[in-house]
Amino acid sequence: MASTRRQLPPQIKKIEVLDRTTGKTVVRYRLAASAGINAETGKRQQVLRHYATEKAARTALAEITDAATKGTFVPRRTNTVREVCENYIAGRHKLRATSKAKLEYDLQPLIERYGDEPVQRLTKAHIDELVADLPVRPASDRRGGWPGWVGSLRLAAG
């Protein structure tokens, strides 16, 4: 029984590239898919990625087109945690000076530990580890309820 040949979708191209470590030519799959309209610029957005296997490229194509159709696609970004926190604080208009100072104080542990990391690389485990490492405030300082930094970290982490 002969195997049937599957044709690649038009968004995936089979290319041959030179492997820098071995010096040999290897096969890669280039994915160029439409990711909908960019919310910031209003222009059409494309995703260009390379994969080692056809299966990985097909899976990524399905995920990207599904997210683009639903409107939930998030492109890769290089924003750091420090930039996001600074923009968040700057975007909080009509805050009293004391409230703004407290917000900066509460976000300081996050910025100190992960300030130069790209924000898209942060995981829930990073935030959980940070919260676990923070010192517990005395009960008299809390004035009931959760400590303030926990809420600020949750807001910043999304």
Image (cartoon, rainbow, N blue to C red):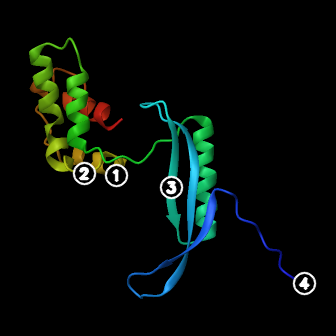
Q: CA distance from mark 1 to mark 2?
A: 7 Å
N-term mark: 4 or 2: 4
Name the quadrant of the C terminus. Answer: top left
Asked which secondary structure carries label 4, the reply is loop
Asked which secondary structure carries label 1, the reply is helix
Residue at (32%, 49%) from the top-left corner? Answer: 122
Q: Answer yes or no: do the residues labelled 2 and 3 have beta carbons within 8 Å? A: no
Name the quadrant of the N terminus. Answer: bottom right
Q: Which residue is mark 1?
A: 121
N-term mark: 4 or 1: 4
N-term mark: 2 or 3: 3
x, y percent for residue 36: 56, 38
Q: Which residue is mark 3?
A: 48
Q: Which residue is mark 4?
A: 1
Residue type marked 4: Met
Q: Residue furthest right?
A: 1
Residue type marked 2: Glu
Q: Is residue 157 above or below residue 21?
A: above
Quarter assignment of residue 141: top left
**Mark 2 nearby-residue class (10 Å; few <14, some 14–19, many ≥20):** some
Q: Answer yes or no: do the residues labelled 1 and 2 have beta carbons within 8 Å? A: yes
Q: Nearer the viewer, residue 129 or 95?
A: 95
Q: Nearer the viewer, residue 58 or 104?
A: 58
**Mark 1 nearby-residue class (10 Å; few <14, some 14–19, many ≥20):** few
Q: Which residue is mark 2?
A: 117
Residue type marked 1: Arg
